[in-house]
């Protein structure tokens, strides 16, 4: 792994660069005292280390092993993982700490595949080839900073760490084994073989084991046809109208579909394929991902690869055809040809795409150096490319997750969007707010903002995933918990169905109240955790403190709870991130806020370690106890119980039980009485 300042290769695990002295980042950097995380753990072990020690000089063994470990470490860094430790000839990496991403399980899988390729390249030509065994597992861990003897490290505790190690031990040389949670999160971007259940050493429950063998290129959105598209009739009609208008007039346009993560952008775009093909359009799907944003011209390469697959030829051939036609000596202005050729060669070089003589490309062409000439050449090439792309048949191009497109491809894609208004070309782009492309204001661009599903559509989707009609109370709970986010609805209902959280009631089902309180599904915790990690530290801490207060909170109370950490807290940033919303009356004093939906509260609260959670509840109870007028006794009792302060909680619970019984609220009164009895029983047991 190179030093960020001087680019000198550094030893795995080194804290400082041995050349310039720069402090190197470690896993502990950026992580607070500790919290709960959903991570993907990757354990990779070099095969044949003992044989090397037996056959080679120790210095040669050391050099070879360190070179191999550096190659593996580079793969981890490339995919945004963190190197937790090196253990002899093995590497333990984690994805999700100290910063989580939307796609950490996929990153871990792609990293494993790259590790295999990197080791093959490194060991090429050696007498003793080097092989890897790799295990990957996904789940919850407790991540805490550990400072001992002047050193600072991170301790990760949880099933994924041990499961990844056991899977690595089970794997054969050059084999990657992964667990069910990783497969579920990374599909369909990976190809796996299902090996069935295995009881891993030291574990009581069997684990579903899968063999990872390849990365798959997305050819359309992986719409799992488990549920129909609901609640999007108006948006669908708007895009279908554009397709039909473009087919009739030969002049297309662009739709920018904006919405939060999971709101249903990709699902809706996928639904357009059938309508596009029915209207006579060729179809193309360009996916983007956060882990590939630093891959130069990835989106452009994906486009070329798609066309090559479509035509059954090599990428270099299809690129030349679109630029110059089938004529090897095209009749173009020499200056124009030079600019375009230079831009394409430079692009190919940066994106590591080969332009072979047998595909019609001249050998030894030097790329352009002048940035302005490159820009002019790329614009000219893009214009010619796009015009020839639609010369025989109109085309619909989907750009999924536009916000994650690599920066180098954006110039070409912007040109393509600009041309869509005058050609039989329809571009459908999905993106998350608040980012807005420069071309969004063009007259032929339509912007559609997707909101959450309404209550009726949420019930319809929940019923479809459950496979039976939801009762009205469960439907209301589902809507208020998810705010109509289609992904959240689907994941919660699938989890409840798989874990027995749905109770049969006549011909329908209802959500078991106990299951409903068990928290957020693992898949959603990873997604929401990534969004929380993207916040500045002050806002992240404020969100977690707000989760202790509850669904609604005043700004003054939150700042008081944050204490010294309140400096820098700006709730407007949380609102811009879509996690909280202000009260309807912005002039209300004190300013009132509430979580956008319950899942953000649950995800933020679930990250807190028990000791910090209890400390925040205790501090909050003390603040509330000193306020005038006094807060509701039931609320105060809740915080005292959550703080683990049974002595102060007991009289509050007994008072809350009496007050509830006095107004006929017997279920609540019984719940308070049970909580009080549990505290008394625990105190009596402690005395014995």
Image (cartoon, grey):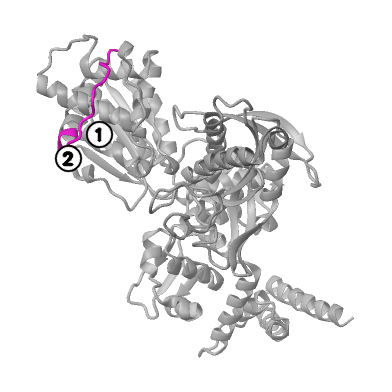
Q: Quadrant of the C terminus?
A: bottom right
When the figure is inspected, residue 596 is found, relative to residue 664, above or below; the finding is above
Give the quarter of the image for residue 45: top right
* Mark closest to the chain's N terminus, 2 or 1: 1
Visible residue check, residue 343: yes
Task: Please tell me which residue is depicted at 71% across the width and 39% down the height of the picture.
Answer: 167
Side of 677 relative to 490 (left or right): right
Query: In the image, which disc is placed on residue 645?
Result: none
Q: Position of residue 546 (x, y in %)?
A: 50, 70
Prevailing secondary structure class for the magenta stretch in the rendered image: loop
User: Where's residue 525, x and y in %?
Assistant: 56, 53
Is residue 51 depicted above or below 671 in this figure?
above
Q: Comparing marks 2 and 1, which lies closer to the viewer?
A: 1
From the viewer's perspective, is 192 left or right of 687?
left
Q: Which residue is mark 1?
A: 412
Q: Which is nearer the eye, 629 or 523?
A: 523
The quadrant holding residue 534 is: bottom left
The percent position of residue 132, horizontal first and vertical second, equals 64, 34
Residue that mark 2 sits on: 443
Q: Residue at x 78, y 41 (%)?
A: 200
- Locate residue 72, reporting x and y percent: 55, 40
Circles 2 and 1, Cβ within 8 Å, touching? The answer is no
Residue drawn at x 69%, y 81% as measured from the top left: 645
Regarding mark 2 in the picture, which secondary structure is present there?
loop
User: What segment carries the magenta color?
Assistant: 360-374
Front residue of this view, candidates 155 and 200: 155
Residue toward you, 247 or 645: 645
Q: Kindly report the distance in space between the C-alpha atoms of the residues bearing marks 2 and 1.
A: 19 Å
């Amino acid at each position: 792994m190179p030093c960020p300042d001087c680019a000198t290769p550094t030893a795995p695990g080194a804290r400082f660069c041995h050349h310039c002295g720069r402090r190197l980042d470690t896993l502990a950097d950026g992580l607070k005292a500790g919290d709960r995380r959903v991570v993907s753990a990757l354990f990779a072990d070099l095969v044949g280390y003992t044989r090397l020690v037996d056959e080679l000089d120790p210095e040669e063994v050391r050099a070879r092993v360190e070179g191999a470990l550096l190659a593996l470490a580079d793969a981890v860094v490339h995919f945004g993982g963190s190197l937790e430790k090196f253990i002899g000839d093995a590497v333990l990496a984690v994805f999700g700490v100290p910063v989580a991403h939307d796609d950490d399980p996929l990153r871990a899988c792609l990293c494993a595949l790259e590790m295999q390729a990197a080791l093959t390249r490194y060991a090429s030509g050696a007498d003793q080839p080097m092989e890897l065994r790799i295990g990957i597992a996904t789940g919850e861990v407790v991540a805490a900073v550990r400072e001992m003897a002047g050193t600072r490290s991170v301790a990760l505790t949880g099933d994924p760490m041990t499961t990844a190690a056991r899977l690595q031990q089970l794997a054969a040389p050059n084999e990657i084994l992964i667990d069910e949670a990783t497969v579920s999160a990374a599909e369909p971007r990976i190809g796996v073989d299902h090996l069935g259940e295995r009881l891993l050493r030291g574990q009581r429950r069997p684990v579903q084991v899968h063999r990872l063998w390849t990365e798959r290129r997305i050819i359309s959105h992986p719409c799992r046809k488990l549920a129909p598209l609901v609640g999007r009739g108006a948006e669908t009609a708007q895009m279908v109208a554009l397709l039909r208008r473009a087919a009739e007039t030969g002049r297309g346009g662009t739709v920018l579909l904006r919405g939060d993560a999971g709101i249903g952008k990709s699902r809706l775009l996928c639904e357009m394929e059938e309508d596009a093909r029915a209207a006579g359009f060729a179809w193309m799907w360009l996916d983007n991902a956060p882990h590939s944003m630093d891959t130069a011209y990835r989106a452009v390469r994906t486009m070329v690869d798609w066309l090559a697959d479509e035509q059954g030829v090599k990428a270099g051939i299809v690129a030349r055809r679109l630029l110059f036609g089938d004529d090897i000596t095209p009749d173009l202005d020499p200056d124009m040809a030079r600019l375009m050729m230079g831009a394409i060669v430079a692009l190919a070089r940066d994106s590591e795409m080969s332009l072979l003589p047998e595909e019609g490309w001249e050998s030894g062409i030097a790329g352009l150096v002048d940035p302005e000439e490159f820009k002019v050449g790329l614009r000219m090439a893009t214009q010619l490319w796009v015009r020839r792309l639609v010369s025989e048949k109109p085309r619909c191009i989907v750009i999924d997750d536009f916000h994650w497109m690599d920066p180098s491809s954006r110039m070409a894609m912007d040109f393509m969007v600009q041309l869509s208004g005058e050609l039989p070309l329809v571009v459908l782009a999905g993106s998350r707010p608040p980012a807005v492309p420069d071309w969004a204001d063009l007259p032929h661009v339509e912007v559609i903002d997707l909101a959450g599903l309404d209550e009726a559509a949420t019930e319809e989707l929940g019923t479809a995933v459950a496979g039976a009609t939801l009762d009205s109370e469960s439907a209301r709970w589902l809507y208020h918990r998810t705010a109509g986010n289609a992904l959240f609805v689907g994941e919660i209902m699938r989890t409840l169905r798989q874990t027995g959280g749905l109770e049969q009631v006549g011909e329908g089902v209802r959500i078991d109240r106990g299951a409903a309180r068990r928290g957020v599904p693992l898949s959603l915790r990873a997604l929401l955790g990534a969004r929380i990690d993207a916040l500045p530290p002050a806002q992240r801490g404020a969100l977690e403190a707000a989760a202790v207060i509850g669904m609604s909170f005043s700004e003054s109370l939150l700042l008081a709870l944050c204490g010294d950490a309140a400096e820098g807290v700006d709730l407007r940033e949380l609102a811009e991130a879509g996690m909280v919303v202000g009260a309807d009356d912005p002039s209300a004093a004190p300013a009132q806020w509430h979580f956008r939906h319950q899942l953000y509260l649950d995800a933020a609260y679930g990250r807190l370690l028990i000791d910090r959670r209890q400390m925040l509840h205790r501090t909050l109870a003390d603040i509330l106890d000193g306020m005038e007028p006094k807060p509701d006794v039931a609320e105060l009792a809740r915080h005292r119980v959550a703080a683990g302060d049974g002595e102060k909680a007991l009289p509050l619970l007994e008072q809350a039980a009496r007050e509830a019984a006095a107004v006929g609220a017997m279920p609540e009164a019984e719940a308070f009485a049970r909580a009080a009895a549990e505290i008394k029983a625990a105190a009596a047991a402690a005395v014995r």
